[in-house]
Image: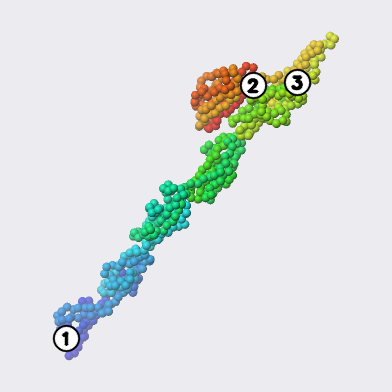
Amino acid sequence: MRKVLILAVVGGVLVSADTALAIPGDPGEPQIGTHQASLTVTPPAAGSVTGTGIACPGDCFEELDYDESCERTRIGGPLECSPIDPSTIRLTAARGPGWTADWGDGDCSAEPSANVCDVEVLDEQTVSLAWLDTGWPTVGFSSPASKAGPATVFNAVAGDNAGVSKVDFYVDGVLRGTDTSLPYQFAPDLSLYADGSSHALKIISQDPSGNRSSDLASAPSHTFTVDRSTSVSSVSTPASLVKAAPSVTFTPPADLKTNGMTCTTKRGTTTTGSTPGCTSPYTAQLGASPADGAYTVELRAEDNVGNVATITRAFTLDKTNPQVQINGGPAEGAVIDSRSASYNFAASDANGVTITCRLDSGAFGPCSGADSHALNGLTLGAHTFTVRAVDGAGNESSAQRTFTVQDPSTQTPDQGNQGGGSPTTTTATTTTGTDITGTPGTTGTAGTTGGTTGTPGNQGESLDPPVVAARSSAKFSVKRGKTKVSKLKLNGLARGMVVEVACKGKGCPRGTTKFTAKKATLDLTSVFKKRTLGAGARIEVRVTQAARRGKLFRYTTQKGSKKPKVQTTIV
């Protein structure tokens, strides 16, 4: 029998048979053919998959052939095929630490390791995978402070392959804060803890998959101490009244932060100067042209954990010299023929004055009266009388007059008519004096006499009547141009002195109130009955007494927060 080669495609498989007159349904010999197959990898959401002919994403498809044997095991039976040494492709997935491949169910004939899939390629194979987050997040402290104050913030450094969803902060085992974004920070509420107490801070991070860095027991821990206060110590206090910028000394806190001291000077609510990073001593900054008035120095210290302490000191600037004038007594340059003399004067200042007197170059000492001074036992010759007024800030003013004491026996009398001659007229010397303020003194009266012997002319000036010794004291409350009389009182009164009180301007009581002194003091506060006076109102208190010159005390209210102007005038 002759053999015939038959080629046929059976079930998509190229087969061949070397048979002689094959009979359908005859088992015959196995038929061998080549079969086409393909492998498709579904691109992963991240990472890569590699294998023979596969570099996905990018190249995610591979086509290949394999042999298959087909035969019938019985006559007339179905053709049964089986692969001969089919191809196996090993796929390896990679994404990075913390990620594990989750291959599709049934896609792998074997998984030698977590990220490896062996695929026996038959027909059209498709392989897919998802990624499992199997990494644990990490967390740690970043230079944590040992002390916690108002400005303290604790920082955590956290990481994870899938990102960090939050960091939890625990104080003494209690969750006190959570931060869900960079930088991971926690500012503790220190009001919950006593100053100086110690506490344990722990941190735990968590990723989007719910993986946590650790449990609370093994979480990173840091101990801190609560610091809720600071202070500026040994702060000096300037004099209440000053005529120049005072200095304030102080000791800053030991834990002062860099440039943590700030020294500020204010006049009322207006800042006149401020120095960050100031050191002791600090000299008040009054500005280019400082005005008299009330000032404060504010010392502000901030320590290195944010605690703040503020100390203030107050003072009043008074650069204005008091007013003083001599208003009674021998005029400037006068010649007197008495060994005694008396001077009257007046002094005033917004902050009170101390008055002293002296003769010639002697030391200043108490005057014999509140507004007068008697000089007794004067020697012949030239003398200088000086009265000095010093206010509470140390500003001073003085007034003086010079005069000459002459022996009366040295005066030249008028020559009378000797033996019936014509009378002779002699004119006495006349002197005009000037006090220190430039006010002309009293001019002596020239005497002219006739007759046999004549009468000496006046060699000096007649003394002015003395001034009443009354003194005034007052206190005012001033706010936004509105003034109230807190106290208005007269001292040094003599029985029978007449006191008249008048007020002109907005808020003033009507008419003039008149009193007759019965005691040395007289309280006039009730005249105003807590009235509010507008700016420009003028209060006048006039004190008079028979045979004496009187005094007029005038108080004029001002705008803003300025206290009333004070004037004292001899009337």
Dot 3 amino acid type: Asp
Q: Are marks 2 and 3 in contact (CB under 8 Å)?
A: no
Q: Dot 2, crowdedness within 10 Å: few (<14), some or many (≥20)?
A: many
Which image quarter is the C terminus in? top right
Instruction: Give whichever of discs 2 and 3 has the lower sequence position.
Output: 3
Q: Circle 3 sits in a helix, a strand or a loop, which is it?
A: loop
Dot 2 amino acid type: Val
Q: Circle 2 sits in a helix, a strand or a loop, which is it?
A: loop
Left or right: residue 36 compared with residue 146: left
Residue labelled with disc 1: 21
Residue 412 or residue 437, whichever sits in front = 412
Q: Residue at x 46, y 52 (%)?
A: 225
Q: Which mark is residue 467?
A: 2
Which corner quadrant of the image does residue 93 belong to?
bottom left
Above or below, 371 relative to 224 = above
Q: How far apart are labels 2 and 3 at the CA level? A: 23 Å
Percent coordinates x, y for residue 223 in the rendering:
44, 55
Residue labelled with disc 3: 337
Dot 1 amino acid type: Leu
Q: How far apart are labels 1 and 2 at the CA level? A: 168 Å
Percent coordinates x, y for residue 89 in the rendering:
31, 74
